[in-house]
Image (cartoon, grey):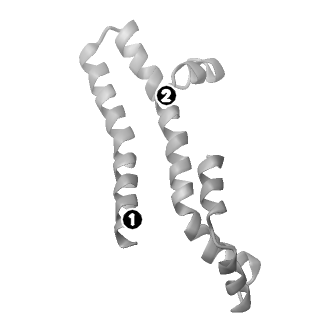
Amino acid sequence: MILPLFATLSKMDGSLLEAAADLGCSRLKAFWLVTVPLSLPGIAAGALLCFIPIAGEFVIPDLLAGSDNMMIGQTLWLEFFTNRDWPVASTIAVVLLVLLLAPLLVYEHIQRKQLESR
């Protein structure tokens, strides 16, 4: 999460914050009106980089939370290898695939629009 956000913020022009201060913005208002909108691509990229591994993990949640809380990766593992219920497991796998691909496709579409507008 930190690296994409750092890369985005390091490319930001510092004179934009100075201009906001010259126009009467407080530091907090300049942060919300200038810094946050310019860092949204980094926030989105960082969120995607965190979301994708989390969705497929099944070992770490099992070690940390035990078997009381079932994540989608644990449910998929349980259906494939313990219950041997292949149709349900395949359905869960397709749902997981859609959950992972949908945000990636939206992010790619937004990036293409931004590149075309330049």
Q: Position of residue 89 (x, y in %)?
A: 31, 20
Q: Could you say whether the residue bearing mark 1 is in a helix, strand or loop? A: helix
Q: Could you say whether the residue bearing mark 2 is in a helix, strand or loop? A: loop
**Residue drawn at (62%, 75%), measured in percent from left and top?**
34
* Kind of residue at disc 2: Met
> How crowded is the residue under tag 2: few (<14 C-alpha within 10 Å), some, or many (20+)?
some
Q: Which mark is residue 14?
A: none
* Kind of residue at disc 1: Leu
**Residue drawn at (63%, 68%), measured in percent from left and top?**
12
Camera-near label (2 vs 1) is 1
Q: Position of residue 6 (x, y in %)?
A: 66, 54
**Residue drawn at (32%, 8%), measured in percent from left and top?**
84
For the image, the number of numbered tags is 2
Please name the residue that numbered disc 2 is placed on. 71
> How crowded is the residue under tag 1: few (<14 C-alpha within 10 Å), some, or many (20+)?
few
Q: Position of residue 59 (x, y in %)?
A: 56, 18
Please name the residue that numbered disc 1 is placed on. 115
- Gap between marks 2 and 1, in whole Å? 36 Å
Q: Is residue 45 above or below residue 89?
A: below
